[in-house]
Amino acid sequence: MNQQNRNVEIKIKSRALIKASNPSSLPKSLISNLDLLLGNFQISFISIYPSSSPCSFDALISVFQSNLPSFLNHFYPFTGRVITDSASNLPSLVCNNSGAELVIAETKNPLSSLNFSEVDQSLNLIQLQFAPDLALSIQLVKFSCGGFSISWSTNHLLVDGHGLSSLVTTWTDFINKGAFFEYPNHDRSIFVPRSPKRYNPSLDQEFTLHESNRIINVLSGRSLLRKLYRVEKEDVDKIRSRANGSVRVTRLEALSAYLWKLLAASIGDLDTNCRMAWIADGRRRLGPKYEEAMKGYLGNVVTYTSREARVEDIKNQPLDYGASLAREAIEEVSSQERFEQLVDWMEDHKNHGKWTETIGVGLGSPTIVISFLAFRVELNFGFGDPVMAMTWIRPSRLGSGSFVFIRGPKKDGSWFVSARLWPRLADVIERDPEMVFKPVTAESLGLVARSNSRL
């Protein structure tokens, strides 16, 4: 069974189901209303390891085969199956220890043959398709150069970006230390509707049914480009310094302000307004009531927030203007009440169909949605550090721009960025004299052997 695209053929050598060897007791609840808000779709965490890895690919296979059964004892839901409940018609998870999938694959191509600046010519080729009901598919792909990739693929119902990164980091802790930095919490029963339910009616405008007549068509969705960029530490520091006003700004606020200016430049006089949106992680924003439960919590605890501004204002105002708008928007949803309202709202609306955030549909003024994954991710479990790591989802019928930032695995202060964007914006970014967003290449990742010629 092969997956082939653009002269890169990946041959699947084996697929095996790995069951938990001694599963723990089941959590009280497996899918929460916050999970249903994000929806039922596949998500992956992909890391790229160079040929200089200290151990062989056979050793890598052995580590996974021998350790996954005991590891999955603590991640028992990931051995189950995602189904549609016949009574409610809602997505659900059956914890039956059917097994997580372990895929072994190889290609005759070296890592250097991948065009890393284009997602469709790199990550899309590495991430192999897996059955929609699988809760976890771990995919090991060997390249002819001796390097390899690891993809941890699951369903967004089970994790958000923080949860997926925690899954991978916990694996690293388990292999290196035989213990966890933080034990996983799968119990969704902490997010139950209040009685009586209460929420702001404005939430009705924040969400749209994911139906064909309410979202863009598939060709419009595919017209957006998918790129990989890298932002160096010195560029982050420089932008942050320029964006500092009366309040010291965060990296997220500074990069948001800079990207907003690039968006405004790409729009020109085509529209009067533009928007930025942010996916805010609620784990540190929920207050004492949820503090203990949030330790190791893998499920979805995120919400969207946004701001709209005049194109001319974004162009002409200093960076601290956009940074302050970002800060105000994120602070607006940084409360326990916000997330409890979302739980209550979804309880009243979950039987109406599948929902998506209105801001991401792509209607109205041009919008970029930013996800900033600033938390700890450890990926060296005896095979060296990867040269790149990134979350991944398949192309969808959403028409907003999207930028996902994740820390560089070498801990040098750099950030990798996965972007879904319009050609006009890509042109502005790549013509930017400051070159803050640098296209990722095999050369920049150190995957191309240097010539020994003495010409």
Image: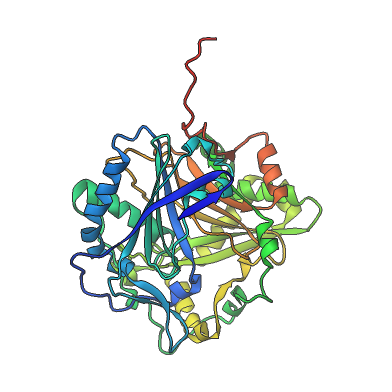
61 or 32: nearer the viewer: 61
Horizontal relation, residue 63 to residue 12: left or right: left
Q: Looking at the image, is 37 positioned above or below residue 285? A: below
Q: Residue at x 50, y 46 (%)?
A: 9
Q: Is residue 70 above or below residue 216?
A: above
Q: Quadrant of residue 336?
A: bottom left
* Farthest front residue in view: 1
Residue 114: % across, % down: 53, 40
What is the x, y in percent for residue 412? 42, 36
Residue 157, image x and y in percent?
43, 70
Question: 427 or 7, which is in the foreground?
Answer: 7
The furthest residue to the top: 455
Q: Residue at x 62, y 48 (%)?
A: 259
- Is the N terminus in the top left, top right, bottom left or bottom right quadrant? bottom left
Can residue 249 be seen here? The reply is: no
Image position of 294 (left or right of 91): left
